[in-house]
Image: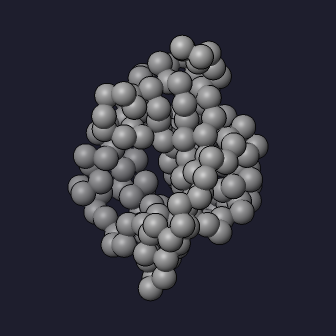
Amino acid sequence: METVVRPARNDDLPAITALYNRYVEDTSVTFDDRPFTAAERQPWFDRFGATGRYRLLVAEEAEEILGYAGTIPFRAKAAYETSVETTIYLGASAQGRGMGQTLYEALFRAIANEDIHRILAGVTLPNPASVALHQKFGFTPVGIFREVGRKFGRYWDVAWYERPNHQTTERPNA
């Protein structure tokens, strides 16, 4: 079967929400602690566009959403607008098949010419697969926030990674 990576559409939101809810309910990968309805996720979905800094792509195979990857604002303050944070989630059937790589390749191609200076990623530890994926795409570790999230009755560390957007690697005022 052929896997297609494309921009997410509004009719993908129920499948995207169901995929995400598995992580909410069963993992520490996200610190959300209750599942969402598609209607509750609509405001999150609405901030993505077909162009610009904030994109959301899905991997689809035989009309099934296998995963998604996107870029979201890092912080709300204007000085941070050229920094984005990545988000990537895979369905169980997509794990171990290189789907994360496929999604990230398409995502980074899509934003290559956008006014983005730095791409950031937070990874709840331990998560060796996510660490490996980010390192494969040139993310370098910048620090670990110790015990910053509490879920399932324990505290979790979050490692932070960064990489330049390859089209904007020059540092002004350097």
Tell me what residue is drawn at x 30 percent, y 34 percent. Answer: 77
Marks counted in the figure total: 0
In the image, is 31 to the left or to the right of 170? left
Q: How is the image coloured?
A: one colour
Q: Can residue 36 be spotted in the picture?
A: yes
Q: Residue furthest front?
A: 174
In the image, is 93 to the left or to the right of 44? right
Q: Quadrant of residue 48?
A: top left
Q: Can residue 101 be spotted in the picture?
A: no
Give the camera-side residue of 64 and 172. Answer: 172
Q: Is residue 114 above or below residue 30?
A: above
What percent of the width, then of the height, locates residue 109? 61, 25
Give the camera-side residue of 1 and 30. Answer: 30
What percent of the width, then of the height, locates residue 161? 61, 46
In the image, is 43 to the left or to the right of 30? left
Q: Quadrant of residue 153?
A: bottom left
